[in-house]
Amino acid sequence: MDYFLLRQSGTIQVPQEKNRQAGKPSIRIMEDISSLDKFDYLSAEALVSDRMKLLLEQYLLEQEWQPCAFVDPQKKAEKTFWFLPPLSYQPEQVTYASNGLPCAVFVKEEDFAKKSPGIFCLKNPKGSPFVIVHLSVAESILRRGYCGLELQRI
Amino acid sequence: MVGSPNANKKIQRGYRKMVERFEKYAVQLREQKLFEMEKIYQEQFTSFIPLFQKHFNTTCENIIKLQQAKELEEISYLEYTLLYSNLLTKKETAEVRVYNNRWYLDSRQHIVGHFDFSALFTKYHELSEELMAYRKQFAGEVSAQEVKAFLLSCAGSFYSYIISAFRFSILPCIGTEPFLTVRRAERFEINVGEYMSYTEAIYKENRQRNSEESLLWFSQRQEYEYAFEDFTKLDFSGADLSEIDLRYSDLRYAKLIGTDFQDSMLFGTRFCHADLTDADLRYCMIHEADFTEANLTNAKFIATEAFAGVPDHIKWKITGYQPVRFCNANLTGADFRRTQIRDADFTGAVMDNAIFLEPQLLYFKLSEKQRQSIQIAGSKSIQK
């Protein structure tokens, strides 16, 4: 099927917020926020850059996005990322590879372009959810030169 | 929804800013490679045609098999799609998909073939290799991923040559088998482009259209709305179609006797086999229009403009134009005085008493027979 696993490419240390309440904004102090410039997706908390949110919100209409601001007080600089909104849609069937990554998803024919959004999340027992995007979203991402991410066809 | 119609409007395409010196070099190299591709396209265009035609015919045969096996119903869209996700894995193949009338929302969209365009992507390869090599001078300042993002932002421009070449290759295929056996909806399109984004309809069929309704639509003088639309075999004789934008419209076999096209945009318009007797094409722009086997008796081309290639080599914008074609057309008595037509293909055209000015003859490649049959303006026999 025409789906891709969205993954972070490259590593970066970003501060976490302990006991963060879901659905609330987050503000975090971070030195050297310029290192975030090379990332549009941070997989640990499914955070997307401001620029990437502009694209994804076209596919996730009427969703509420919560910001995650990274602030460098010394340089008086700030960079905002956004938590991917909770996405409830689950495909009919998911197959996982031996390394635990999803390798195939099956969306019901009647769900396609209706209930099924261009983006959905799969539970990951070992950590942050897997973000799955449809071909249309994957192509849109690639056309726009987003950085620090990979798209793996599943 | 899988896709939103607005999805591609707000956010600009492109790439992130890179180290200035690298970016300047990369942009210059991209322009250079695109102009080199332009040269290949202009010089070797005819050698590309069989590649497209053979693949298209094979694709049609596949579709017919699927339709006969009842795995596929009648189709509304056939698309050759450049997938950036394929380029990421170094697969230089366009995916050929067919859709019903729901187009991208068709849940059963079938992949019916893959078109390997790597032979036409050599300049893209060179750009990729040279940029990756140059990146090494920047020791960590420019990441491989930044270069890949830049390369992907360039791919669409290189792919536009595939769109253009396909556009000029398709016509002989659509009038013959196996295409004619493919079960198609009343409205049908062949597109070449990107998935759910910029895509160009290189051929459209609309069997519901008639002359009266089309003229009403033309009266709105919309910009580019008529491009690739099917007006074949319709009758617009005597109509005032001046100052209209009919770029890439399909007017093959149309009756256009005495039609007034003055000052119109007719880039790439398909006039093959049309009857344009006494048609007025003065001041039109007819770059890469196709008048193959058209009847252009007494048509007027005064101050009409056409050229092949690109206007300059400063900044690459679009693929250069192919020569305007008058192959096997009847140009008896056609008036070419003060015309700005250049690089035209007059192979096999009948040019009895076609009127030219002496100084402009050097711009036309005419056969000896054609040169002897034309009239040079200034002689008393020419009616004004």
Image: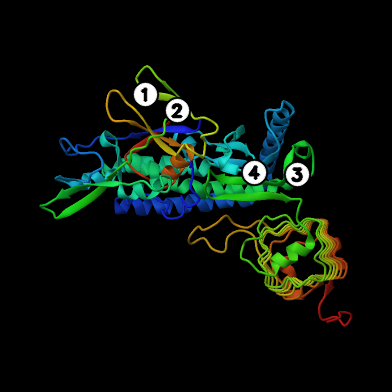
Subunit that carries the residue with mark 3: B
- Determine which of the numbered discs, if any, sits on residue B174 in the image: 3
Q: Amino acid at mark 2?
A: Ile
Q: CA distance from mark 2 to mark 4?
A: 27 Å
Q: Nearer the viewer, residue A61 or B253?
A: A61
Q: Earlier in the sequence, mark 1 or mark 2?
A: 1
Q: Dot 4 corresponds to which residue?
A: B101
Local packing at callout 4 (Cα closer than 10 Å; few below 14, some 14-19, many 20+) is some
What residue is rendered at 62% in x and 39% in y?
Answer: B99
Q: Is residue B101 visible?
A: yes
- Quarter of the image for residue A133 reads top left
Q: Quadrant of the C terminus of chain B?
A: bottom right
Are the numbered discs 1 and 2 placed on the same chain, yes or no? yes
Circles 3 and 1 in contact, beta carbons < 8 Å: no
Residue B165 against residue B277 in the figure, above or below: above
Q: Dot 1 corresponds to which residue?
A: A101
Circles 2 and 4 in contact, beta carbons < 8 Å: no
State left or right for residue A31 relative to residue B200: left
Subunit that carries the residue with mark 2: A
The mark closer to the camera, 3 or 2, is: 2
Q: CA distance from mark 3 to mark 1?
A: 45 Å
Q: Dot 2 corresponds to which residue?
A: A154
